[in-house]
């Protein structure tokens, strides 16, 4: 179920384009900003507003890996799994995060604080290993640095 505010924001986004479906990613982001993730019901409602088939919008959502189709925690950690990060010690960082947070990829901490997900190259390869927490990019990761970073997200 979308709120009036979400619908209004989606309509505002739609108005920027000649074709309503062109606002699909932004509309999904609007829902996610408010609800943290995009449920099947919410997605169907967005598709109705954008006058596009639900399956088409589902394809958009699954292609765009920053749209969450399952519930996530208050903060989402995206750890880069691509080659430079592997070479520069991703395994240690992943192991540290797994141990510190008690979760593996795809899982959320019991207190709902963090969800851990893999992601492809974040474009910061010369400063690998890298990760994103919500919309913030962090690089040259070390286990010590991870402690400082995570503290910022409650
Ligand atoms: S390989 Fe990790 S940022 Fe490019």
Image (tube, rainbow, N blue to C red):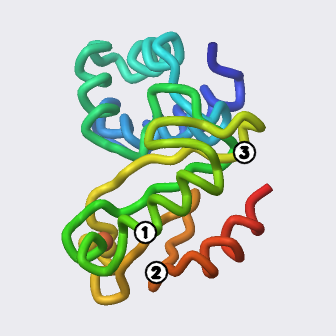
Counting from the top left corner in percent of width and height, residue 104 is at 48, 42
Mark 2 or 1, nearer chain start: 1
Sequence-first disc among 3 and 2: 3
In the image shown, does 107 or 45 lie closer to the viewer? Answer: 107
Q: Are marks 1 and 3 in contact (CB under 8 Å)?
A: no
Quadrant where the image shows the N terminus: top right
Using residue 74 as the reference point, say whether residue 16 is left or right of it: left
- The residue that mark 2 highlights is 139
Between 37 and 49, which is closer to the camera in this rendering? 37
Instruction: Write down the residue under mark 1.
Output: 92
Q: Return the x and y of residue 152 as percentages of the image width and height.
A: 76, 68
Horizontal side of 54 relative to 26 (left or right) equals: left
Q: Indicate the quadrant where residue 67 lies.
A: top left
Mark 3: few/some/many CA within 10 Å (<14, 14-19, 20+)? some
Label drawn at residue 113 = 3
Q: Quadrant for residue 12, please give it.
A: top right
Q: How far apart are marks 1 and 3 (CA)?
A: 22 Å
Q: Which of marks 1 and 3 is nearer the N terminus?
A: 1
The relative height of residue 134 versus residue 62 in the rendered view (above or below) is below
Label 2 near ligand 1 (CB < 8 Å): yes
Picture layout, residue 114 above or below residue 85: above
> Which secondary structure, mark 2?
loop
> Which circle marks residue 65 in the picture?
none
In the rendering, at what x and y percent does residue 15 appear? 45, 39
**Ligand 1: quadrant of the figure:** bottom left
């Amino acid at each position: 179920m979308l709120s009036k505010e979400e619908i209004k924001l989606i309509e505002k986004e739609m108005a920027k384009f000649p074709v309503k479906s062109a606002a699909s990613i932004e509309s999904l982001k609007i829902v996610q900003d408010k609800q943290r993730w995009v449920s099947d019901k919410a997605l169907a409602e967005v598709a109705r507003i954008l006058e596009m088939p639900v399956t088409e919008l589902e394809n958009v959502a699954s292609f765009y890996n920053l749209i969450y189709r399952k519930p996530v925690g208050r903060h989402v950690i995206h750890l880069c799994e691509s080659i430079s990060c592997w070479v520069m010690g991703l395994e240690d960082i992943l192991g540290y995060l797994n141990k510190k947070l008690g979760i593996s990829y795809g899982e959320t901490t019991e207190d709902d604080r963090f969800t851990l997900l893999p992601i492809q190259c974040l474009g910061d390869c010369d400063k690998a290993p890298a990760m994103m927490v919500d919309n913030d990019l962090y690089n040259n990761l070390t286990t010590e640095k991870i402690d400082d970073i995570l503290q910022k997200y409650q």
